Image (cartoon, helix red, strand yellow):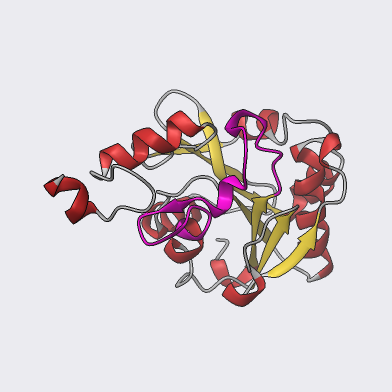
Amino acid sequence: MLTPEQTVLVLLAAGRSRRFNDGDKLAERFLDKPLAFHVVTALEAIPFMARVAVVSGTSLDFAGRGYRVVENPDLSLGQARSLCHGVTVAKAMGAEAVLVALADMPRVTAGHIYRMFDRADAPDIVVASSDGVQPMPPALFGKDRFDELMALEGDQGARNLVRGGRHVVTTPAELVDIDTQDDLRELRELYGIASDAEPPQAAAQS
């Protein structure tokens, strides 16, 4: 059985955010912190072997949150290149697995991640999240999959590997992925926030 102590968390935080229009999507405020720091906070109590953030052009200080920061210098090569950078670091550290998470999924919980580890019982394992319809990140990969991950190309990332793995179902709300300004607006409205600067109490009174 794989454990967090054997696993490197690889946080992908280097997307081009083309559908988000202007600005640094990951630094957008949501509730009390930048969007990307919600998953960082949710997973901070899990005793990972190490944490790696693959970034590009963000102002956020992942190093200050305990992450080894790796720069992806060429986003034109797609998400797979970011994944390759993170897995390369994990392999060099002697990790038994990587847990790949996305920085723009702010509602992922530690409880869900632990349920994924409960399904991870072999070095070639792939365990992905699912909303009951399709598999997606976060996803857990045993070390026997590292070379496959490092050979991936383009924006599809590890999609085919994820489809063929085990799937741990959780609510669609937990796996919401913020790609556009409308996605962020809808998430704020769910929490009763009228704008990024307005706390929930003020929004409720307005």
| Along the viewing direction, whichever of 62 and 121 lies nearer the viewer | 62
Q: Vertical placement of 10 versus 66: above or below? A: above
Which residue lies at the image location 45% right of the left edge and 53% below the top edge? Answer: 29
x and y, in percent, of residue 162 in the image: 62, 34
- Which residue lies most toward the front here? 206
Q: Would residue 29 be found to the left or right of residue 204 on screen?
A: right
Q: Quadrant of residue 163?
A: top right
Q: Would residue 46 be seen by someone viewing this image from the given angle?
A: yes
x and y, in percent, of residue 94 in the image: 78, 69
Which residue lies at the image location 84% right of the left edge and 46% below the top edge? Answer: 150
Q: Would residue 90 be found to the left or right of residue 46 on screen?
A: right
| Along the viewing direction, whichever of 3 and 16 lies nearer the viewer | 16
Q: Would residue 173 be seen by someone viewing this image from the given angle?
A: no
Which residue lies at the image location 74% right of the left edge and 53% below the top edge? Answer: 57
Magenta span of residues: 14-38
x and y, in percent, of residue 52 in the image: 69, 64
